[in-house]
Amino acid sequence: MHRSGFTPRLLRPAEQAELLSYGLGITNVVARGTARAADLTRDELARGGRTLVAKVRRYRPSWLAVLGVSAYRAAFDHPQARIGPQTVRLGGARVWVLPNPSGLNAHYTLDRLVAEFRALLAAGQGGP
């Protein structure tokens, strides 16, 4: 997130709460850890998607970024979704799907991930 310009400095994991001071928040679609996204069931993802929409309605962010196109497709029943901005809104927020930064998604290099995050930041700031 720092290399993409979302934060003015690199934050340590223990500093996650500082993201709020930058107008950013992080949550999970499903609140259990797995080795791979494929370990989550469609039902878990759909339930998590409904919970996330409720959070978006409550906190009213301008943008909702979801990491992982496969998880997004399942959680929100948008099977044709691609990386990038979506045409639908969720809970009133515009939606951008980002690649999952997991090491299992190795075809997305760090530079490509940074570029995708920068595109979201530019859109959030009124850029192209």
Image (cartoon, rainbow, N blue to C red):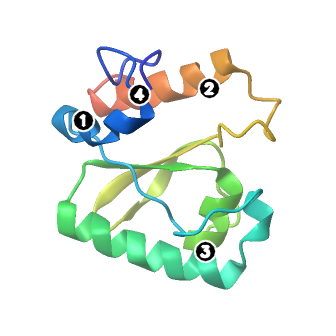
Is 106 positioned to the left or the right of 66 in the image? right
The residue that mark 3 highlights is 45
The CA distance from mark 3 to mark 4 is 28 Å
Residue at 56% of width from left, 21% of height from top? 114
The residue that mark 2 highlights is 113
Residue at 79% of width from left, 64% of height from top? 38
The residue that mark 4 highlights is 12
Tally the marks.
4
* Callout 2 crowding tier (Cα within 10 Å): few <14, some 14–19, many ≥20: some
| Of 8 and 58, the residue lying toward us | 8
The CA distance from mark 2 to mark 4 is 19 Å
From the top left corner, tell me how far across and down residue 107 is, in percent. 82, 29
**Type of amino acid under label 4:** Arg
At mark 3, the secondary structure is helix
The CA distance from mark 3 to mark 1 is 27 Å
Image quarter of the C terminus: top left
**Type of amino acid under label 3:** Leu
The CA distance from mark 4 to mark 1 is 10 Å
The residue that mark 1 highlights is 18
From the top left corner, tell me how far across and down residue 110 is, in percent. 66, 20
* Callout 1 crowding tier (Cα within 10 Å): few <14, some 14–19, many ≥20: some
**Type of amino acid under label 1:** Glu
Quadrant hosting residue 102: top right
Residue at 43% of width from left, 35% of height from top? 13
Q: Is residue 68 above or below residue 4?
A: below
Q: Is label 4 or label 1 in front?
A: 4
| Lower position in the chain sequence, tag 2 or tag 4 | 4
Is 20 positioned to the left or the right of 94 in the image? left
Q: Is residue 32 above or below residue 24?
A: below
**Type of amino acid under label 2:** Leu
